[in-house]
Image (tube, rainbow, N blue to C red):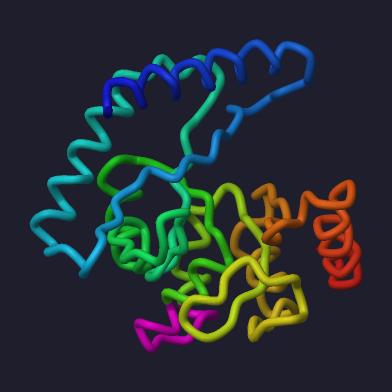
């Protein structure tokens, strides 16, 4: 299964390199990846998390990147998958994100919705989480969130203070790119995404 995943990711990388020839890409082209690492019934131990990160690095080392870079995405503690709700283990806490980026000289995609839920579970201020990970975040997914598992909500309909989020992003990672990632935002010709962009525009992102 992992070998097939590596083959498929290489296909994505190759296609991205081909597409990049049609654009003026001065920097590496980011590819956001959900690298897995969830469990069904409970969270796994730190030892097992470390083992999974080694497996991840072994997998990524087999990819010929060309002009691209792989950005693991920060994850929520209790993600919804098509098979139901699960427990996520990798790229959840700010500490784990920082340790990974430092150890493997990597950047990430910081999903604001996901990481807000993680910060809430960890009982730390989200502003603190955001500032501590900003230097490692070269791309952002923007969506609102509430409770401990409400992710991908339209901006302004959840609990996140996006004025504060925008301020921190502009201060700490001004070169980062972003995109709204609203659940089902692609429907009706992307109306959910356009609505999110209109809201973000009022915040001067």
- The residue located at (63%, 66%) in the rendering is 152
Residues 178 and 147: in front is 147
Among all residues in the image, which is located at the extreme front? 83
Please state the horizontal and vertical placement of residue 143, each as a whole percent of the image. 67, 66
Residues 34 and 172: in front is 34
Please state the horizontal and vertical placement of residue 148, each as a whole percent of the image. 46, 81
- The residue located at (60%, 76%) in the rendering is 145
State whether residue 191 is above or below residue 127: above
- The residue located at (38%, 17%) in the rendering is 7
126 magenta-colored: yes
Q: Main secondary structure of the magenta part?
A: helix
The range drawn in magenta is: 119-128
Left or right: 75 in relation to 161: left
Please tell me in which quadrant of the rendered image residue 75 appears. bottom left
Instruction: Check the picture and name the quadrant holding the C terminus.
Output: bottom right
Left or right: 10 in relation to 142: left
Please tell me in which quadrant of the rendered image residue 39 appears. bottom left
Please tell me in which quadrant of the rendered image residue 113 appears. bottom right
Please state the horizontal and vertical placement of residue 167, each as a whole percent of the image. 71, 73
Please state the horizontal and vertical placement of residue 26, each as a whole percent of the image. 69, 24
State whether residue 173 is above or below residue 43: above
Left or right: 37 in relation to 20: left
Left or right: 174 in relation to 128: right
State whether residue 52 is above or below residue 55: below
């Amino acid at each position: 299964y992992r070998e097939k995943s590596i083959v498929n990711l290489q296909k994505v990388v190759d296609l991205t390199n081909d597409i990049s020839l049609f654009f003026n890409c001065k920097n590496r082209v980011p590819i956001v990846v959900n690298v897995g690492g969830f469990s069904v019934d409970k969270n796994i131990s730190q030892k097992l998390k470390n083992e999974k990160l080694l497996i991840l690095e072994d997998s990524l080392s087999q990819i010929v990147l060309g002009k691209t870079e792989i950005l693991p995405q920060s994850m929520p503690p209790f993600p919804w998958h098509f098979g139901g709700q699960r427990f996520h283990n990798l790229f959840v806490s700010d500490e784990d994100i920082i340790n990974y980026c430092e150890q493997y000289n990597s950047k990430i995609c910081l999903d604001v919705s996901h990481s807000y839920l993680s910060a809430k579970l960890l009982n730390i201020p989200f502003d603190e989480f955001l500032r501590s990970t900003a230097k490692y975040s070269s791309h952002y997914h923007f969506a609102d969130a509430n409770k401990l598992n409400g992710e991908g909500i339209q901006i302004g309909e959840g609990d996140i203070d996006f004025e504060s989020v925008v301020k921190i992003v502009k201060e700490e990672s001004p070169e980062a790119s972003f995109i709204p990632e609203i659940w089902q935002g692609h429907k009706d010709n992307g109306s959910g995404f356009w609505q999110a962009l209109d809201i973000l525009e009022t915040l001067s992102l």
